[in-house]
Image (cartoon, rainbow, N blue to C red):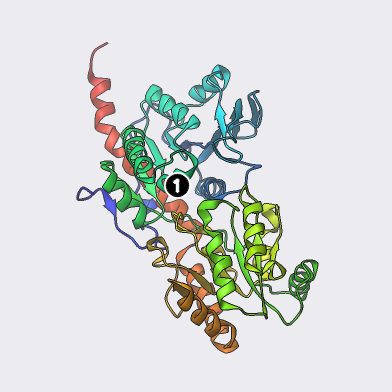
Amino acid sequence: MRSGDAVDRTECEPRRVNVNKMHPAPSTTAPERPLRVLLTTDWWEPVVNGVVASVQTLRRELLALGCDVRVLTLSQGIRARNEKGVYRIGSVSASMVYDRARIGMPSGRRVLREILQWQPDVVHSQAEFSTFMWARRIARTLSVPLVHTYHTIYEDYTHYYSPSRSMGRKVVESFSRRVLSKTDAVVVPTTKVARLLSGYGVHRPLHVIPTGLDLDRFRPARSPEEHADARALRASLGIEPGQQVLLSVSRLAKEKNLDEVLEMMTVADRADTMLVLVGEGPYRAELEARATALGIADRVRFTGVVAPADIPRWYRMGDVFVGASLSETQGLTFIEAMASGLPLLVRRDPSLASVVVEGVTGWQFEGPAQFTARLTSLLDDPRGREQMSRAALERARTTCGAQEFGRSVLGVYQQARERRAPLMLRREAVPA
């Protein structure tokens, strides 16, 4: 990583930006008009995943900061269509490669024309495939900065596209260098990802900015109605009042390493616990078969698809949040769990170093013996677990709020515009 290129911050402590000191870059438009930001993403509603949650949060916070924000994404069919503030270009299914993935169609001149007429000041891409090509073209045509958020550690997904992990990693390195070389700045959610990209040979300005959360949505049960709702959810899954719930919220995919969670449950052998896997995905059948083979099928519950608006309800019915994924760039669900007052018991991973404060907000484990010991300490010490719950809630609220996320990203836009300003002035000075 080049000196000055990376902001080396802990994962839940966004880079501080003083928005009040921002100065507008040279522009032919009126200085008082709002900053126009185009967010481009291959993933958007109705899909539910971490990228969609991050982009939605960023959009909301930028609007709150006075920006004019629009989204360019993929339609769920071959026809392009527009909604209020959202352009959708036609696409075809790529689910054979990755569940619910889509590939954008090359047509869409009307959408492109409308965006160019709108004239965004910054283009912020959130995916490296279909919409990235559009983002690059729009930014280049308008001579505006192209900022990119690198959401996914693709080398952890080699089982989808390569029989060899080492070969897959080389493909990812080359691909990432090529894509990111076209950008003015790169946003990453954790120091782990910044170091990874530096190791790939990416030499663009890197900004470590964790995705913030809407902490009004993710919180412990407060009212009698919310407590009753949590009990009702447990009852709907056949969970007895005396059982304690180990909760996982994730897409049921191989890279989430939920097999290991099932194995840890087997070794821990706690008859008073129930594992609830909230979510759906292509690996569900394998997980169900694995639970049966391990003899714990009666202590594992699969909820299936859960509406995004209902996710906070499911966090509130848990006692401990568990996970073993090593493919997270930030682990948003872990932070959501903390914001909901759940202690964490998760597989050790550098991306979670500042999320899981050992013995304070939860524990990271390595191996069955450590998992069993940590689980025992959490379940058999209600007072200690309550202290961890309060500490997890406090840490989420003080370090992972959405407002700081939006302000920090806005600061990246301004830096990128300021770096481009001399180039734009030189171009304007060249006679036609």
Residue 141 to residue 359: above or below: above
Q: Can residue 358 be seen in this view?
A: yes
Question: Which of the two residues, 221 or 360, is positioned nearer the viewer here?
Answer: 360
Q: Is residue 17 visible?
A: no
The amino acid sitting under disc 1 is Thr
Q: Is the residue marked by circle 1 packed among few (<14), some (14-19), or many (20+) residues within 10 Å?
A: many
- Kindly identify which residue carries mark 1: 152
Residue 239 falls in image quadrant: bottom right
Residue 10 falls in image quadrant: bottom left
Residue 7 falls in image quadrant: bottom left
Q: Where is residue 39 in the image (x, y as percent from the top left)?
A: 50, 37
The number of discs equals 1
What is the quadrant of the C terminus in the image? top left
**Residue drawn at x 25%, y 42% as measured from the top left:** 201
Residue 253 to residue 298: above or below: above
Q: Is residue 357 shown left or right of residue 338?
A: left
Question: Which of the two residues, 254 or 136, is positioned nearer the viewer here?
Answer: 254
Residue 135 to residue 333: above or below: above
Q: Is mark 1 on a helix, strand or loop?
A: loop
